[in-house]
Image (cartoon, grey):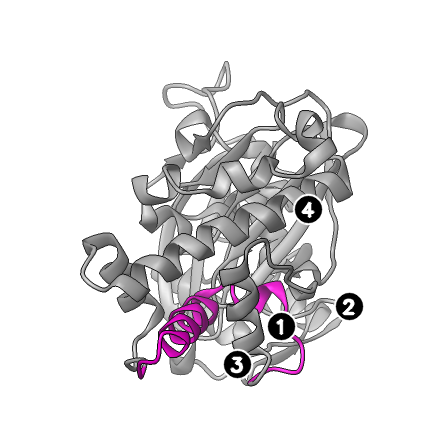
Amino acid sequence: MAADLSPAIPGTAGNAAPIAAPILVADIGGTNARFGLIDGRIVRDTRVLRCADYASIEDAATAYLAAVGLAAVGTPGRPRRGAFAVAGPVTGDHIAMTNLVWQFSVNRVRDALGLDGLVVINDFTAVALSVPRLADEDRRQIGEGAPQAGAVVGVLGPGSGLGVSGLVPGANNRWTALSGEGGHVTMAPISDRESAVLGQLRKSFEHVSAERVLSGPGLVNLYSALTILDGREPAALTPAQVADNALAGSEPHCVEAVEMFCAMLGTVAGNLALTLGARGGVYIAGGIVPKLGTLFTHSRFRKRFMEKGRMRDFLAPIPTYVITHDLPAFLGLAEAAGAE
């Protein structure tokens, strides 16, 4: 199945031959490796492989190329460039995955796969780079505001952790994604209830960062803290169970945990917008928020985003969006690889 990443490009309809060989893209996490091919601005032939089934990243990539009939070097249509997103830091040629035993040399993998070039970037950097390529149907706006053309963009991604980045525009419509550890900033309370929750969490954590509450594990932390504060024993729930209970309205502390999650995310998103001067908008990525649907839309997220006293008028025009695209990292890899 192919996913169109942009409006049709004149001259590419019908049976015209591809302008260039496709780019091999991969989004590699601790459990699964998602592969695909980018033709111009089209992603096709996506596959999901279990990392545990392969000894190395080149083995997985070779298996993918074989599955789509492009294993042999020189095969017509075989990719000559690659762009991979990995769950871990990228600081040079040697890559060590955070939650996977794979370690590899970028240059060695490039040569093993017969590629002319291979770009490897952090997985959240790839998600951040997807923003310039999102179509209107790939995002849902929360609240009012309109983006300022050519302005800095903020990106947050609550998932297994909390990714934070910013996009800075450059020459020739290219963007640079900032690489930092913004998910580990100190979480600040806004209400007495939030102060009590953070105080409870400080009994377990030396430092209560934003990630301790704005992530899958953070959602469980909020639920557990709220339950204990009310003199009850928390159940052993997963992040998905907390969210499902909140959506069903079946457990009051799950409902309150998700409501607090949304409000705290608004606070951190507003902080990011102020820090970066993100007049181009702030985008929420990750797997948690899109599943909350209208609960998030009607939450205190947007209200808390703008609740910055004298800075309210600065923040009010800045739009906030939820990324709804299924594979935003692939869009970001197309940007990183310089696909037209």
Amino acid at the residue labelled 3: Leu
Instruction: Identify residue for label 1.
Output: 208
How far is mark 2 from mark 1, CA to CA? 27 Å
Q: Is residue 76 visible?
A: no
- x, y (%) of residue 24? 53, 53
How far is mark 4 from mark 1, CA to CA? 17 Å
Q: Which residue is drawn at 48% across and 69% down?
A: 218
Q: Earlier in the sequence, mark 3 or mark 1?
A: 3
Q: Dot 1: few (<14), some (14–19), or many (≥20) neighbours within 10 Å?
A: many
Q: Which residue is drawn at 61% across and 26% down?
A: 316
Q: Earlier in the sequence, mark 2 or mark 3?
A: 2
Q: Which of marks 4 and 1 is nearer the N terminus?
A: 1
How far is mark 2 from mark 3, CA to CA? 17 Å
Instruction: Identify residue for label 4.
Output: 271
Q: Which quadrant holds the C terminus?
A: top right
Instruction: Identify residue for label 2.
Output: 91
Q: Earlier in the sequence, mark 4 or mark 3?
A: 3
Secondary structure of the residue carrying tag 4 is helix
Q: Dot 4: few (<14), some (14–19), or many (≥20) neighbours within 10 Å?
A: some
